[in-house]
């Protein structure tokens, strides 16, 4: 995924979640992603995200869903 594709993905995610993806990216780069997530996501969303980020099996399961595959396909096509 190149920078343009990543930027489009971040913009789409921001629109759908209301979370400022640039601030999230900056928090990750500064080692403060946990703080950002805890302040900006609901407790249920935080728990789900942390599970996916720390559990390889959960991440693979999520990425193997038809919805995730379709999203990745669209992102790679630039739509």
Image (cartoon, grey):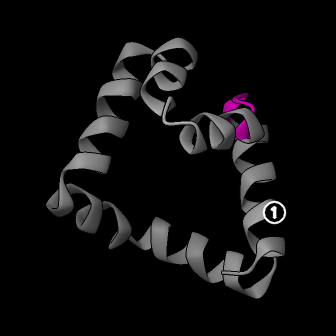
In screen coordinates, is 47 left or right of 27?
left
The residue sitting at the front extreme is 30
Q: Residue 31 in the image: state x and y as whole percent.
A: 49, 36
Q: How would you rate the neighbour count of disc 1 (Cα within 10 Å): few for under 14, some for 14-19, many for 20 or more?
A: some
Vertical position of residue 6 compared to residue 40: above or below: below
Q: Residue 42 in the image: state x and y as whole percent.
A: 46, 16
In screen coordinates, is 31 left or right of 48?
right
- Asked where in the image residue 4 lies, by quadrant, the reply is bottom right
Residue 18 lies in the magenta-colored region? yes
Give the position of the C terminus as an image quadrant.
Answer: bottom right
The residue sitting at the bottom extreme is 77
In screen coordinates, is 8 left or right of 69?
right
Q: Which residue corresponds to mark 1?
A: 8
Which secondary structure dominates the residues rendered in magenta?
loop
Magenta-colored span: 17-21
Vertical position of residue 48 compared to residue 59: above or below: above
Q: Residue 65 in the image: state x and y as whole percent.
A: 36, 68
- Give the residue at x 24% y 40%: 51
- Give the residue at x 57% y 76%: 72
Vertical position of residue 15 compared to residue 1: above or below: above
- Give the residue at x 66% y 81%: 1
């Amino acid at each position: 995924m190149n920078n343009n594709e990543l930027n489009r993905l971040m913009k789409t995610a921001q629109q759908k979640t209301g979370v400022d993806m640039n601030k999230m990216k900056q928090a990750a780069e500064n080692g403060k992603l946990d703080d950002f997530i805890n302040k900006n996501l609901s407790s249920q969303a935080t728990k789900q995200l942390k599970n996916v980020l720390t559990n390889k099996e959960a991440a693979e399961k999520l990425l193997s869903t038809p919805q995730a595959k379709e999203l990745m396909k669209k992102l790679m096509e630039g739509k």
